[in-house]
Image: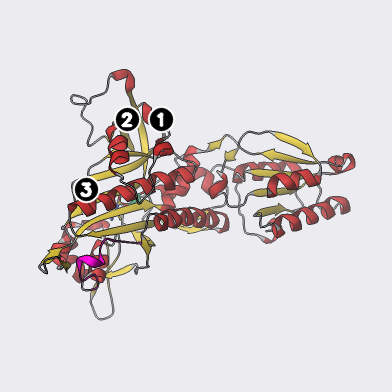
Amino acid sequence: MRLSAYFLPTLKDTPTEAQILSHRLMLRAGMIRQTSAGIYAWLPLGHRVLRKIEQIVRSEQDAAGAVELLMPTVQSAELWRASGRYEDYGKEMLRIRDRHDREMLYGPTAEEVITDIVKGTLKSYRDLPRTLYNIQWKFRDEIRPRFGVMRGREFLMKDAYSFDLDFAGAKRAYQKMFLAYLRTFARMGIRAIPMKADSGPIGGDMSHEFIILADTGESAVFCDRRWVEWDVLASAPAYDQDLEPFFADATGIYAATEEKHNPDTCPLPAEQLVTARGIEVGHIFYFGTKYSKPLGAVVAGPDGNPVTLEMGSYGIGVSRLVAAVIEASHDDAGIIWPESVAPFKVGLINLKSGDAACDKVCADLYDVLRTAQVEVLYDDREERPGVKFADMDLIGLPWQLVVGPRGLKAGTVELKNRATGERLELSQDSALERLTS
Ligand code: 5CA
């Protein structure tokens, strides 16, 4: 992509309305634009990151055996009346009336819809287990939307739902998702700690929140120091193996949110306890027959008798993750994207646009990189070098490839690693080799 033909409205000044760093950086880097309170347009750069994160979530859900579908955003109130949640959900639910005066709503989650979809289609115990998921926009009329996409009103969520015959099956589904979540967040370069949690209005009694530690987090959390250093995935099993020992190990190391933490009964010695703030990027629940029972979702068991489906649900805040990754990875100059979620891998900086030699070399590098399917953003604007460097640092692409007249005379270009700040003077060929290998 040539920057001269892109849409990247970066800001020099720090927006005063933004209270936390990720929100400020997302606005300054031209990633999002607020259109109403808690509602954002994803500008091209932000949209690319959102899609990258979504794709990592999708591939790990698929790897864990979950099956993707897409449910609508607008739901009928009728289903929520049947589950008993329509009144309970309160003011957070955006309620809508259609032209026939039917009560509709913009879905804040989809337990009712998915249960209604599988009802009558999953007919027998032989159709189980099944886990279905979708990645879809949700709306919650948060009383205090804040921190940008971190707590929006409209936000993108991955929500998965498991269906099993009995508790043992449901527990296995839960453990699979637990492991899938650890893998998902690790691929984004962040350490999300599974913490015992309250299940809130979703209901149920086995529940973990996946939380990354950050000073700007909304909730207080408590965990064993080991979580901060431990590579939990080093000993992770494959999905077709027994997951119980891994799950027991991982949940055996203390980690709890404020609601579940009790200083009097906490088993850890003071020096082993980390007290911090955290951002919830995922939340998983087991809730048994809470929805399947009122909605009548049953299958025929092995003896032919009807069995009410055992369910769990599993959420990931896809749009929130964009901000969470930034909270975890930035410096004074701007964002530092982990390569796996970066909007582009390389920023190509032409220090003297309009100079025939610089233009030619940049055009060549740009072509070779694109042919090699390396995602590259080419700053071909007629701007001062200082502006280009500052913008490139701000938007945080992992590599900067800098082409200027002085280097070209010496036969070199400069390759800068955004995370380490390391700069190398290289021939064009060896720079390209590093970026394409
Ligand atoms: N039905 C369940 C799981 S499918 C559910 O809705 N869980 S949840 O309420 O915990 O939401 C799942 C995830 O969505 C959260 O862990 C969080 O990362 C994200 N999320 C929730 N509310 C918001 C919000 N207002 N803005 C951005 N992300 C949010």
132 magenta-colored: yes
| Residue sitting farthest toward the bottom | 100
Report, in whole angstroms, how far the alpha carbon at label 2 lies from the one at label 1.
9 Å
Question: In the image, what residue type sits under mark 1?
Answer: Val
What residue range appears in magenta?
Answer: 121-133
> In the image, what residue occupies the spot 32% across and 58% down?
160
Question: In the image, what residue type sits under mark 2?
Answer: Cys
Report, in whole angstroms, how far the alpha carbon at label 2 lies from the one at label 3.
21 Å
Res 423 quadrant in image: top right
Question: Eyeballing the image, is 302 above or below 157?
Answer: below
**Contact flag, marks 2 and 1 (Cβ < 8 Å):** yes
Question: Eyeballing the image, is 278 above or below 307?
Answer: above
Relative to the observer, which residue lies in front, 59 or 322?
59
Res 117 quadrant in image: bottom left
135 magenta-colored: no
Q: Left of 209 or right of it: where is 304?
A: left
Query: Mark 3 highlights which residue?
Result: 200
Query: Mark 2 highlights which residue?
Result: 223
Report, in whole angstroms, how far the alpha carbon at label 1 lies from the one at label 3.
26 Å
> In the image, what residue occupies the spot 54% across and 52% down?
31
Query: Tag 3's secondary structure?
Result: helix
Relative to the observer, which residue lies in front, 94 or 277?
277
Query: Tag 2's secondary structure?
Result: strand
Q: Which disc, if any, is residue 228? A: 1
Disc 3: residue Cβ within 8 A of ligand 1's nearest atom: yes
Is residue 21 visible to us here? Answer: no
Decide which of tag 1 and tag 3 comes sooner along the chain.
3
